[in-house]
């Protein structure tokens, strides 16, 4: 249901009173993100961990050999095991420079994918209404194993969709005042209706501790332990379990593509990966149809 897709709705909304990036600020943000990416990939490479760029970063590499010109984020795909190894090494090397937010580990963190956030900055989004560690971030998405058998894969998928939805709704209820205000100022009826609906569903689960709910959802997402399974998926990705279900061979082994004068690993079959996420991905969208992130005050990017 379109009304429930609040993430897509807010990406295409202009919200009065939010931060609008100037061209200079966008370029500064992209420069800071590249420096963060170099720190992250340095640790990944030192540890010998497989990873790829993800989402719009792959699209940027294919279409622009770098950032999509108006884009302001970087995504990385990684296995659970790879992330666990990376997190330990990254904290040892960069604990004074970055916050590392991990589902089921970081208290009050109600997202189902990890984030690395730069200390000394404030780049607050609608997900950060209850988060003071809201520095400039790079998202890391778990590439989850899922079952080769149809029945077990279906059960896994239903559970991922269920837990992802109720976790999101529980977060909407916790952050209801700020989210409703943002939706009201957007002028989007779909966004306001979706926000109200998810808040009501979240109220039904309001007696559930949000951290415990996130841990349960995270365990369910990673329940398939077969690292050689035919299929993988990204339950916390933009298209969720079914929309991001694909054969492992389309992801790995990775292929190197140019991204801002760096050669970085991307999914093995970039064409099928991007078509699944974006359709006709080579077409440049009109200015009105371009996605943008919504930033809230205080906005601090030295």
Image (cartoon, grey):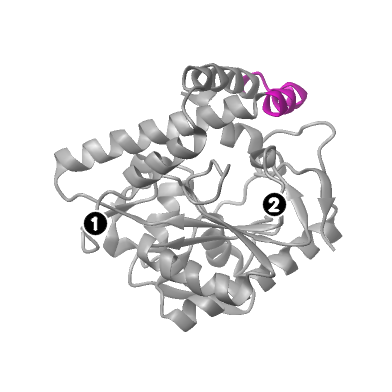
Q: Residue reaching furthest bottom?
A: 46
| 82 shown above or below 55 | below
Q: Position of residue 2 (x, y in %)?
A: 51, 25
Image quarter of residue 131: top right
Q: Secondary structure at mark 2?
A: loop
- Asked if residue 243 is positioned above or below residue 90 in the image, the reply reads above
Image point (85%, 53%), residue name:
22
Label placed on residue 214: none
Labels 1, 2: front one: 2
Q: Is residue 223 above or below residue 198?
A: below
**21 horizontally vs 239: left or right:** right
Of 150 and 274, nearer the camera is 150
User: Measuring 65% from the left and 24% from the top, which residue is drawn there?
Assistant: 176
| Disc 1 target residue | 225
Predominant secondary structure in magenta?
Answer: helix
Question: Dot 1 surroundings within 10 Å: few (below 14), some, or many (20 or more)?
Answer: few
The span picked out in magenta is 177-190
Quadrant location of residue 184? Answer: top right
- From this viewpoint, is residue 28 visible? yes
Mark with earlier residue (1, 2): 2
Q: Which residue is mark 2?
A: 133
């Amino acid at each position: 249901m379109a009304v429930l897709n609040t993430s897509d709705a807010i990406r295409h909304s202009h919200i009065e009173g939010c931060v609008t990036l100037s061209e200079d600020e966008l370029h500064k943000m992209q420069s800071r993100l590249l420096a963060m990416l170099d720190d992250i990939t340095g640790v990944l490479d030192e540890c010998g961990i497989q990873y790829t760029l993800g989402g719009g970063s792959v699209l940027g590499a294919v279409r622009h050999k770098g950032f999509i010109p108006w884009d302001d984020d970087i995504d990385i795909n990684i296995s659970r095991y790879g992330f666990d190894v990376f997190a330990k090494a990254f904290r040892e090397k960069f604990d004074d420079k970055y916050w590392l937010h991990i589902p089921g580990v970081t208290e009050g963190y109600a997202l189902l994918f990890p984030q690395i956030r730069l200390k000394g900055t404030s780049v607050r989004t609608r997900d950060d209404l209850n988060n003071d560690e809201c520095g400039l971030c790079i998202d890391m998405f778990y590439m989850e194993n899922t079952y080769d058998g149809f029945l077990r894969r279906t059960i896994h998928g239903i559970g991922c969709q269920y837990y992802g939805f109720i976790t999101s709704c529980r977060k909407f209820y916790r952050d209801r005042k700020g989210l409703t205000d943002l939706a009201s100022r957007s002028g989007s009826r779909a966004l306001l209706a979706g926000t109200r609906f998810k808040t009501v569903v979240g109220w039904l689960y309001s007696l559930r501790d949000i951290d415990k709910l996130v841990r349960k959802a995270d365990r369910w997402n990673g329940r398939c332990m077969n690292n050689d399974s035919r299929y993988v998926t990204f339950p916390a990705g933009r298209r969720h379990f079914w929309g991001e279900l694909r054969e492992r061979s389309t992801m790995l082994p990775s292929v190197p593509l140019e991204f801002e004068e760096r050669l970085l690993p991307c999914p093995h079959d970039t064409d099928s990966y991007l078509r699944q996420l974006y359709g006709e991905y080579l077409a440049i969208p009109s200015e009105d149809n371009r996605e943008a992130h919504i930033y809230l005050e205080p906005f601090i990017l030295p």
